[in-house]
Image (cartoon, rainbow, N blue to C red):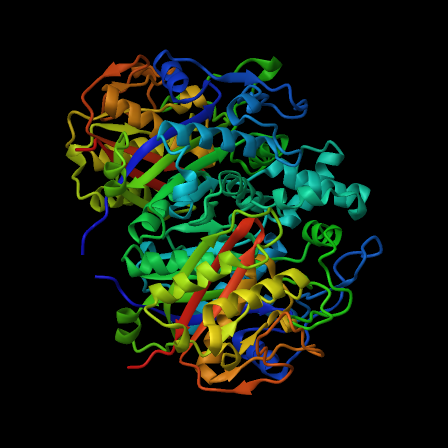
Amino acid sequence: MSKKRIVITGLGVASSIGIGKKDFWKALISAKNGLKQIKRFDLQEIDSQFCYEISEIDYEKYMKQKPSSYMDRGSRFLLVGTKLALSDSSLDQKIDELHSDIGVVTGTQYGCIHSNFDFHRTTLLKGPAYVNPMRFPSTLINFPSSMVSLFFKTDALNTTIASGTAAGADAVGYACQMIKDERAKIILASGLADVELEDFFIIHSQKHRGFQLLPDCPGKKMPVVKPFDKSAEGLVLGESAAVLVLEELDHAEIRGANIYAEILGYKSSFDTDLSTATLKDTMQGALDDASLNPESIDYISASANGWLPGDKNEAQAINEVFANNKELALGSIKSMVGELCGASAPTQTVSACFSINKGVIPPTLNFHKESQAVKLNGLISNAKMSKKINFVMVNSFGYDGNNASLVIGKYS
Amino acid sequence: MDRRVVVTGMGVVSPIGSGIKEFWKGLVKGKNGCQQITLFDTSKYRTDIAGEVKDTSYLDCLTAQEIRMLYRGSQFAVAAARMALEDSGLDSQQIPKELFGTCMGSNTPDPATGEEIVFLLNKDDYSLKPRKKAQISSLTNKAMEVLKPFKFKGPAVLIPTACAAGNYCLGYAYDLIRTGRADYMFAGGADPMNQLGYAGFNRLRALASDKCQPFDKNRKGLVMSEGAGILVLESLDSAVKRNAKIYAEMKGYGLSSESYHPTAPHPDGIGGVKAMESALERASLKPEDIDYINAHGTGTPANDRMESKAINKVFGNRINKIPVSSTKSMVGHMMGAASAAEAIATCLAINNDLIPPTINFEEKDPKCDIDCVPNKARKATINTALSNSFAFGGNIASVIFGKWQK
């Protein structure tokens, strides 16, 4: 049986450090920090008031029309990201012809959490007669994905994956399976994270079970996100919509598409104990799936986000799996874009595609060798690094217990 | 080489009974699970009926701590998972933990947690002291909840494709086992009764005021309900090797996306046609091989008309020979758990060669030209059966099960 190969032929991203792949990459390698104090809603009661926020997006500029009134903020990000990805892969003119071959798979933690709570709030506090029926679909987690399929008229399939912080990686894994099984030739695989008051509330509440994720920012002092650092104080949430055009290799070659990279391996797991052993199995599983050994990986785009227990665990697991890889480089872009939850892996993958094609690894901000939490096996730097890169591992390890790793390689 | 996938365990919590024995007994007798709502005040709504889980026997499947800590929807899920695992005869201690995963369907972030957060935020109370605060972390991911008690470490994925979620999850789990990424999977869905959904359907005027009457000329709408359905999927080799009871083989599934409207289905059911045809093709079956269809059959005017049309399109002149029933007439619309419960009903129908009826059927609708097995269960040999599900956002999935023969 012939094994189908899956390649990335388009990238679209809306992030706190730039809209569009070029701006995003330029920002990454120039160490731009997307951290902003939140003004959209009042966070007086919460000790952390910062977020890697997407400044208002010029929706009409990208979409050439006004957004529907019932379309929430997150869906707008995802539509813009998708539009950019489609034009990047030269598919935007071909959708009419290919609509039944194109599917949509979106990874997201909550979907449009704010729309959901808003609808709920109206129902409970004002009364059910006051809800806007057009907003009812946006209470569902699958709404952003459905908006994409509705807007671009793609008919092959439309699935949302909501496996917590690993949702984006699981969405990519699922999309690959769908292409291998010929359910679609092209899939717009994406990750979406928008940050709303409720996200802060939920994460803040963890503190009360002795599980502090957010850094305290007394006097509105801007937090410093320090992946892998022993003085790290916590993660900071970020916003992103990252869209990968995944395509079956033959299809991409026949239409002469530009190929960024190939998806080679994927493994997903779950462990509430957040044990090192499970993370090792996850990375090893992705390597096995890609038929690669640990020594072939040139760069790990780490999941580390400045939440110390998670970062230590990942460092330990990397050290053990990659013990014999003397050339390994690693880094975390979350120091510039934040913890993107369901959007993490697709956003990291956009960055990884550039790393593969440009031979450059973005910096890990605020990383200092002398204060690393666990002595890391692998080169990591707070400045960008040049390196020939053939194979990248993208990690998405969550504080919620969901984990997944992807292996991406240079297309040859 | 692809592995064959079979169903070896099932667990269900539903308005007509919990556990597959009670559930099946209810389905065969045509038990109506939809009654007046007791869980919240309905004075501000147009209607007041729903399928609530009133029989609390499912609580016997939970530990005291789970009863204390878990919200209603998660309690349903964990109880159904325990029932399914016990039914499968698998010993959770003996199974390699990383080979057991789950895929669960659910509609929205947990509405009970949501309700609590709405009230807390309204009071500007950020201290979050509710007794169930631990569950906040798994606000959406019920999949995590069902793996936790057993310490299973396979993939834990939630697919929130609304009312079709259960079938999507079955598809996901099927693929993982078929391709060897997992050996055992819980696949299903769970959703609790809640005001968020009830308010939405109420405002869309999609709710029936007295009963759920799928395919009836005078049907008025759906009846929202709650519960959980979970199936244990396993590779055929593993099931045969341990001499397990096999309910059915999962033969394949079809997906489609209707980029038509955020809530309404395409009037010709083009997405349904595509999903059914794709499921048949992937199962290497022809329309004439299907002996029974468990319809999505919500009881809304638009859905049942569209679905009948789609089934007619796929099954053509055989249409009057294929029984098509809607178990939602009895169970109500369990939202994210609906198609999981229907998959269980379908497997039980195959096992017992007995078709559950569409109850509350009074007058035939000429626009629903199908044999809906009105009001009484019917004996028939069922070798292969198909189950449909449609959802908001054009998420459509059809699943096919077949009798397993040695």
Where residue B152 sits, quadrant-wise, is: bottom left
Name the foreground residue: B265 vs A95: A95
Classify B114 as above or below B247: above
Taking the image as drawn, is residue B348 in sight? no
Where residue A94 sits, quadrant-wise, is: top left
Residue B58 image position (x, y, % from top left): 59, 68
Residue B305 image position (x, y, % from top left): 62, 65
Left or right side of B89 for B243: left
Classify A202 as above or below B279: above
Name the foreground residue: A187 vs B345: A187
Classify A311 as above or below B268: above
Give the total of numbered labels: 0
Left or right side of B120 for B288: left
At x 64%, y 19%, the residue is A39
Q: Quadrant of the C terminus of chain A?
A: top left
Residue A95 image position (x, y, % from top left): 42, 39
Left or right side of B79 for A368: left
Name the foreground residue: B229 vs B94: B229
Q: Quadrant of the N terminus of chain A?
A: bottom left
Left or right side of B283 for B317: right
At x 30%, y 59%, the residue is B96
Where residue B129 sits, quadrant-wise, is: top right
Residue A155 image position (x, y, % from top left): 45, 48
Taking the image as drawn, is residue B123 in sight? yes
Classify B15 as above or below B404: above
